[in-house]
Amino acid sequence: MQIRCIDTGYGAVKFLDLPSYKNLNGWMDRVGSRPAVKRGLLVNSGSPGGIKERHSAKDFEQAEAAL
C-alpha cells in the first residue's frame, strides 16, 4: 500500500489530519484486511512475526505457527 508510508513511515497522521479522510480510511481498512496484503506486509518486516526472507509458502506457515 503506497499510502501506508504516511502513517507508519512518516508519522504524518496528525499533520495531514488523516482521520478526517473517511473514504481513504475505509479503503485502507479494506485493502489492509485482504489476506494477500497481510502476508505481503510480513515479508522483510521488522515487526514480531515478520519474515526476514520469503522463499516458499512454508515461510508463512512457520510465521503463523510462531504467533
Image (tube, rainbow, N blue to C red):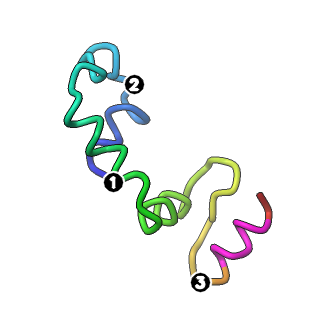
Question: Mark 3 sits on what residue?
Answer: 57
Residue 66 higher or lower than 10, as above or below: below
Q: Which mark is residue 54?
A: none
Q: Is residue 30 magenta?
A: no
* Quarter location, residue 29: top left
Relative side of 63 to 26, left or right = right
Q: Quadrant of the C terminus?
A: bottom right
The x, y position of residue 30, in whole percent, is 34, 50
Residue 21 at what x, y percent from top left?
21, 26
Q: Nearer the viewer, residue 54 or 23?
A: 23
Of the residues tagged 3 and 1, which is closer to the observer?
A: 1
Mark 2 lies on a secondary structure that is: loop
**Residue 22 horizontal/vertical position (percent):** 23, 29
Disc 1 marks which residue? 31
Q: Nearer the viewer, mark 1 or mark 2?
A: 1
- Relative to 27, 7 lies left or right: right
Q: Is residue 34 above or below residue 22?
A: below
Left or right position of 56 against 41: right
